[in-house]
Structure formats: C-alpha cells, structure tokens
Image: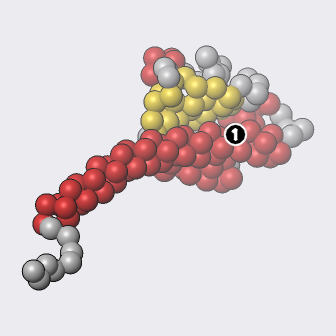
Amino acid sequence: MNFKKGFTLIELLVVVAIIGILASVVLASLNTARGKGANAAVKANLANIRPQAELVYDGVSPNSYATACANPTVAAALASADSSGGGTNKCFGDANGWVVATELKVTEGASTGWCVDSTGKSKGITAAQDTAITGATTLCP
C-alpha cells in the first residue's frame, strides 16, 4: 500500500476554524484595551492642563482665568484630549477659576466624561453633569 503523508482537507479546515475563533477573541479584548488606553490619554491630557494654567496665572489677578482656554499650552492639551476621546469639550474661565470637561472614548461605569477644574477636582462625570457645566462658576460637579 502506498499512502501519502499529509493532512486531510477536513483537518485543515478544523485548524483554520480554531485559529479564526481565537483571533476574534483576541481582537475583542484588544478593542477594550484600546478604549481604556484612550480614556487614560484623555485623563492625562486634562490633568496636564491644571499645572500649566497655574504656571501661567500664578500671581496674576483672578480675572485672568477668563483667558485660561485661550492659552496655547492649555488649548493644545485640550485638543489632544479631544482627539483621544469623544471630540467635544467645554472650557470656561472667569474670576472664580476655570473648568474643563470632555467626553471619554468609552464609558467607565456611569461616567461618560472627565472634568478638571482650578480647585483641584479631577473626576468622572455623567452626561447630565456635563450638561450642567455652564461656566467656571459651576466647576466640576
């Protein structure tokens, strides 16, 4: 008898199917990790706004907080947060301080956005809390 050595077509199809299933599981996990990484980038960019704004406005009249959003360094950090996250933000400043809020890429619990203000708050906010931010006098809820 002359048997050829090798795999049958069914064996090869089973192996390809198993590899496909494993690849889909890995890709699903990768998308979750990618979203969490984007959220971390949003938080880091907004956290960097606080020291930059305080460096610029240290020792200056509180009314200068009204221009916090116009500062190039603050604006660059906010633009970077927007590109990492949902792409919409709020930035307000007045005599009482400043507040910045932007959307997260993926929802974390009940939080759909992230808020940072001049009082030191840095926290997740819901869509309703984001809507309630109408100026720096509101600050982070």
Color theme of the render: secondary structure
Q: Is 79 on the left-hand or right-hand side of 99? A: left
Q: Residue at x 49, y 36 (%)?
A: 104
Q: Residue at x 15, y 67 (%)?
A: 8
Q: Nearer the viewer, residue 52 or 110?
A: 110
Q: Residue furthest bottom?
A: 2
Q: Residue furthest front?
A: 1
Q: Quadrant of residue 4?
A: bottom left
Q: Secondary structure at mark 1?
A: helix
Q: Nearer the viewer, residue 104 or 99?
A: 104
Q: Nearer the viewer, residue 133 or 10?
A: 10
For residue 44, say whether it is visible.
yes
Q: Is 26 on the left-hand or right-hand side of 78? A: left
The percent position of residue 46, horizontal first and vertical second, equals 64, 40
Q: Is 114 on the left-hand or right-hand side of 32? A: right
Q: Nearer the viewer, residue 138 or 102?
A: 102
Q: Quadrant of the N terminus?
A: bottom left
The percent position of residue 138, horizontal first and vertical second, equals 62, 18
Q: Residue at x 63, y 22 (%)?
A: 140
Are there few (<14), some (14-19), or many (20+) residues within 10 Å of tag 1?
many
- The residue that mark 1 highlights is 47
Q: Is 91 on the left-hand or right-hand side of 122? A: left
Q: Quadrant of the C terminus?
A: top right
Q: Residue furthest left?
A: 1
Looking at numbered disc 1 in the image, what kind of residue is underneath it? Ala
